[in-house]
Image: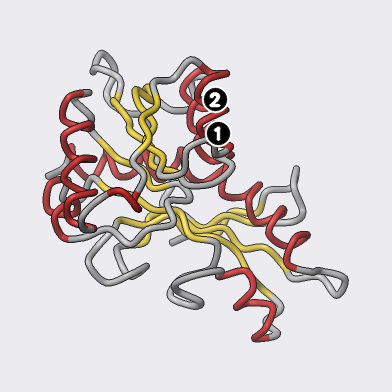
Amino acid sequence: MPDFADHSDPSGSLQWPLPQPLPAGGAPLRLAVMASGEGSNFEALVMACAEGRLQGQVVVLAVNRDGCGAQRRAERLAIPCQVFDHRRQPSRQALDQALIALFRAHRVDLVVMAGWMRIVTPVLIEAFPERLLNIHPSLLPSFRGADGVAQALAAGVTLAGCTAHLVTEEVDAGTILVQAAVPVLPEDDRQRLHARIQRQEHRILPMAVTLAAQRLAQG
């Protein structure tokens, strides 16, 4: 994939196959988002739709922590939100079945895991094949799994970043859609590096959604 430096933001560069606009006249994508934390990527998707950078609409948010930041953002943005407390579910499969019912009720085209801190099961993956995306704070395939930012710092790398990819049963191993590279600075700690990586996540996630939709349109 070609590399595109963003001269307006020297803290990162993008690598992606340049997404083309979706066909004119088509219905906007109906998007669902899954989140566990502050929800900044969720809001970035909502804003990308509102500003016309993404031909879609976030129609529902699912969270697994009542009162989390993502839920509060949904209230402010007037996006329907439903809480699925994983501790009250009999199994991971049962949780995923409940999510599937929600997404089907909202006639969702694509599902975006934007900081969903639970490993999903084949039940959800098979219900939305090639239509389930994840954003991960590392340049995959490096530093898969939990806390990719801390892993990168511990490894002493000079280049970190983020990856938007399709979800498969193997954690953080699906087809890569978009990546952004972020240099690790000498003064970086986890909080500083994570903040710069998140800015790149907000940029690449709408692109990844468009690319995923294009893949589906092309069969």
Residue 162 drawn above or below residue 219: below
Residues packed near mark 1 inside 10 Å, few (<14), some (14 to 19) or many (20 plus): some
Left or right of residue 2, residue 24 in this image: left
For mark 2, does the 10 Å Cα neighbourhood hold few (<14), some (14 to 19), or many (20 or more) residues?
Answer: some
State the CA–CA distance, disc 2 to disc 1: 5 Å
Q: In the rendered image, which residue does mark 2 sit on?
A: 47
- What residue is pinned by disc 1? 44
In which quadrant will I find the N terminus?
bottom left
Determine the residue positioned at 55% across, 34% down. Answer: 44
* Kind of residue indicated by mark 2: Met
- Which SS class for mark 2? helix
Image coordinates for residue 94, horizontal then vertical, percent: 17, 50
Quarter of the image holding residue 122?
Answer: bottom left
Q: Residue at x 30, y 65 (%)?
A: 174
Asked if disc 2 and disc 1 are in contact, CB closer than 8 Å, the reply is: yes
Left or right: 40, with 173 as reference point: right
Q: Amino acid at mark 1?
A: Ala
Q: Horizontally, is 178 left or right of 24 in the view?
A: right
Q: Residue at x 63, y 50 (%)?
A: 198
Visible residue check, residue 55: no
The answer to which of 3 and 100 lies nearer the viewer is: 100
Q: Is residue 81 left or right of residue 168?
A: right
Quadrant of residue 14 within the rendered picture: bottom right
Q: Is residue 196 above or below residue 189?
A: above
Residue 112 appears at what percent x and percent y? 36, 43
